Image (tube, grey):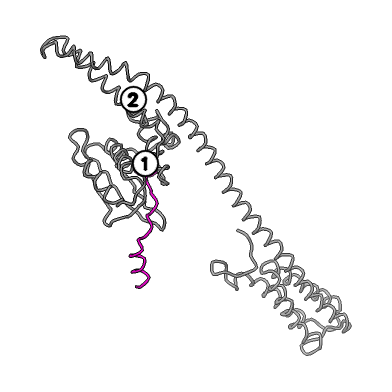
Amino acid sequence: MIASSDNTASGPSFWVRYRLVIGLVLLVSFLHYNTAVHIHALHGIYRRLYYFPIIIAAFRGGRRAGLLSSLLVAALYIPHSLGWIGFDPAPGIEKFLEMGLYLAMGVLTGTLVDRINTSRRELAITARDLRKALDEKSRMEAELVRTARLAAVGRLSAGLAHEIRNPLASIQGSAEVLGDEFPADHPKAGLTRILLQESRRLNDVLTRFLAFARNEPGETAVFDFAAEIRAVAHLLDHRPDGPHPVIRIEAPAPVRVRGNPEQTRQILLNLGLNAVQAADTGGEVTLTVDVTDRSARCEVRDSGPGFDPDALENFGTPFYSTRPGGTGLGLATSLRLAEDMGGRLEARTGPGGRISFSLPLAPRPESEETAWLAS
């Protein structure tokens, strides 16, 4: 905690901060008042003891506290120096010079303490800004590495997809022709079915490769984010195959955002399918919408095992997937699409899996703005 010369509501009370100062001032004054006049040495010591509470007050409250404590000491010492309460046998000039030194000590020490506290605050602000800059630097470095990796993978996948797709089409066409020549109960009919299924699966993988390799941002428009979420939830709830967890939606009001509706639905559907796979039958998937001043965020939560540290570190990395048979291209593509639309896609720790997808809010129409101002 950085010391401050100002008392704040969250800091210690006045009594807690200055009870030692007040106690020392009263103690020294009591000794002054009750010491015999002929004991010159003790009166000189008591005058010097007044410096301790003045210095302590200055350290605890800065220049203002140092000045006030020195004035308090001078006010308590004047009746004694003048003989109104007891008497200090020292020469008058010495006593008044001592009181001047009280004031000088309080102001000087408090000023130095204020400067030290100001320097501490400036250093704390500098350290905080430096930490932010270092965090931003680390984030940008990680983003550059990820972008370079995605670009390399995109170029590689696009080249491989084009090179493989043509012969794959020939293989698939040949398998269909061969399958027509064998009846369903023929031993070779099963082999041709496997050949067709695997070639179609490979074609689907190549299609995802090409979708990931394309870097063409779609046209943006203003649309209802909540409506897209409800549509995706309806699709997830009526899937013909796979696990069927309970789908819950918390998006009651229309939320106008700016982005590409098709790409938004693609992202939401990909996140929803991953959540359904993680939750499995008997689990639960929840889609929640939160609106801030500038963006709308959809959080997709599932009752699955959640993300381990390795999965969080590799979130959105192509070819990294915790699901058996997964390629990781779905999340990588969704991450790129979200960034192209000016949004964000983030994985969060917590119970179950949590991924948030945010998009910028659309500007309020002039008619709504006028009605709001009129109200």
Residue 185 point in image, percent of width and height: 10, 12
Q: Amino acid type of disc 1?
A: Gly
Which of the labelled discs sits on residue 38, or is there none? none
Look at the picture and state if 364 lies above or below 40. above
Residue 332 point in image, percent of width and height: 39, 34
Write down the residue under mark 1. 218
Question: Sequence order check: which comes first, mark 2 or mark 1?
Answer: 2
Q: Quadrant of residue 80?
A: bottom right
The stretch in magenta equals 348-375
Magenta highlight on residue 349: yes
Q: Is residue 35 left or right of residue 185?
A: right
SS of the residue under disc 1: loop
Q: Nearer the viewer, residue 110 or 265?
A: 265
Look at the picture and state if 164 lies above or below 130. above
* Residue found at x 51% / y 33%: 145
Write down the residue under mark 2. 206
